[in-house]
Image (cartoon, helix red, strand yellow):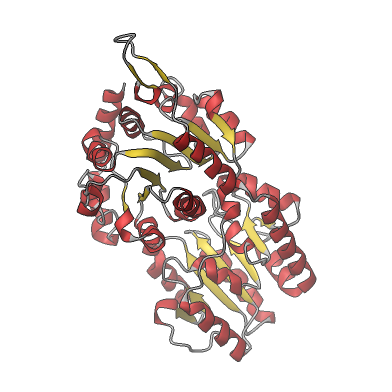
Amino acid sequence: MFALYSLLLALFLLLTLPYWLLQMMRHGKYRAGLRQRFGAVSPHLAEPGAQPTIWVHAVSVGEVVASSGVIAALRNQFPSHRIVISTTTNTGQKLAAQRFGAENVFYFPLDFSLAVRPYLAALRPQLIVIAETEFWPNFLRLAKHHGARIAVINCRISDRSFPGYKRLRFWLPTVLENVDLFLAQTEDDRRRLIEIGATDSKVTVAGNLKFDVAPPPSPKILASLHESIRQSGAGPVLVCGSTLEGEEGSLLSAFRNILANHPKAVMILAPRHAERFSEVAALIEQLGFRMVRRSLWSGEPLAGSVFLVDTIGELSALYSLATVAFVGGSLVPRGGHNILEPALYGVPIVTGNHYENFRDIVNLFSSRNAVRIVGLAELPLVLIELLESSEERATLGQNALAALASQRGATEATVTALRQLIEFPPAPVPSPQSPDVHKPTGNSA
């Protein structure tokens, strides 16, 4: 079955090659780290050493941020171990390099034996920690053959992915058997993991690491923006983050209504994907708004304008400027984005009614009157109502901070479970070849 999977994966990559080439040429995507993805281990990773290694895989920015507390705790508790971090996306790679040092960061290899084996041979990981749900069959199988313990942390099975996993139920138990420990976010995630083939005894609920995330370091521009807004008397400030195609037009229409009563209002607009920056800039100009691009801003007043965040990695901190924050990916059926980023600052949060990817978080906040959920029709009215009511804004913000505080503790639970994997290896079992020869359970495949 693994051979068939590898063949199908190779055919998929071959058939979609024009798409990947087009993305490389038009947007520069996937070009970075291409050799690493095909198994070329960088010299700084391949250097032989006696240090045992912990390999953490965090796909993109969200997983890097969520895993940061766990990585910091592991570094503190296991100073004799080397901790390396792999990512899949360019943005995740840059953030991981900033936080953990470029010498410890690399791109995750494609799920082919020829690409995976060089990393396992060079790193010889004692423990592999995978953030959320990256079930790469060849990687898991080969890592287990190399004697690594494997844990999947902060694991969730979304509404969108669950039916697909269920269709693979005939094979997934074989793949998931290679994992030693699953730490699910919720009881629903635990139930779904077991239903798709994870062994019951290996699955436990540790909570959601994203509740433990601390506010990010403030970028230099934050203080400049704050001072500019204060000196010019600009405001209120509407921060719209992680927006997707089909959302900016509705948000700009709502902002036009806000300007009618608040001519010094400011919209800080941060599209989710860098390749759309120019497209969104053209839309803003087409609709007749005064626009300031973050990459070109030199301190001019912002009152009455749209401040387009055409950079990566600054949005989380910019939420602290918000009178009201809107979290995108949710007015269109794309599953929503993380509302915990603005919640860290106690600002009132609005999100659309397509929030399936963050269902548990949004439902928790909604049950505690800590978020407003809107459709396209309600969006302008809800924004205006919140901007007109300081009392309602304060209530939402305080409730958001309380909801955050009530769910913290996942990092401690996760690190405790990982420590047990490192300190207490599995008991040896007799080899099927000879009753006198023993080997670790983790090497039986």
Above or below, 15 relative to 400: above
Above or below, 118 relative to 230: above
- Residue at the (28%, 53%) spot, across then down: 30
Query: Left of 21 or right of it: where is 184?
Result: right
Q: Position of residue 50 (x, y in %)?
A: 28, 44
Q: Is residue 160 visible?
A: no
Above or below, 98 relative to 229: above
Q: Position of residue 122 (x, y in %)?
A: 24, 42
The one of 26 and 360 positioned closer to us in this rendering:
360
Q: Position of residue 397 (x, y in %)?
A: 71, 65
Q: Position of residue 110 (x, y in %)?
A: 28, 41
The one of 144 and 162 positioned closer to us in this rendering:
144
- Toward the right, the furthest residue is 391
- Residue at the (26%, 24%) spot, across then down: 3
- Residue at the (47%, 74%) spot, across then down: 219
Q: Is residue 253 visible?
A: yes
Residue 115 placement: quadrant? top left
Q: How many marks?
A: 0
- Residue at the (51%, 23%) spot, across then down: 199
Query: Left of 268 or right of it: where is 408?
Result: right
Above or below, 71 relative to 392: above
Quadrant showing the N terminus: top left
The one of 38 and 279 positioned closer to us in this rendering:
38
Quadrant showing the C terminus: top left
Query: Left of 211 or right of it: where is 123?
Result: left
Residue 440 placement: quadrant? top left
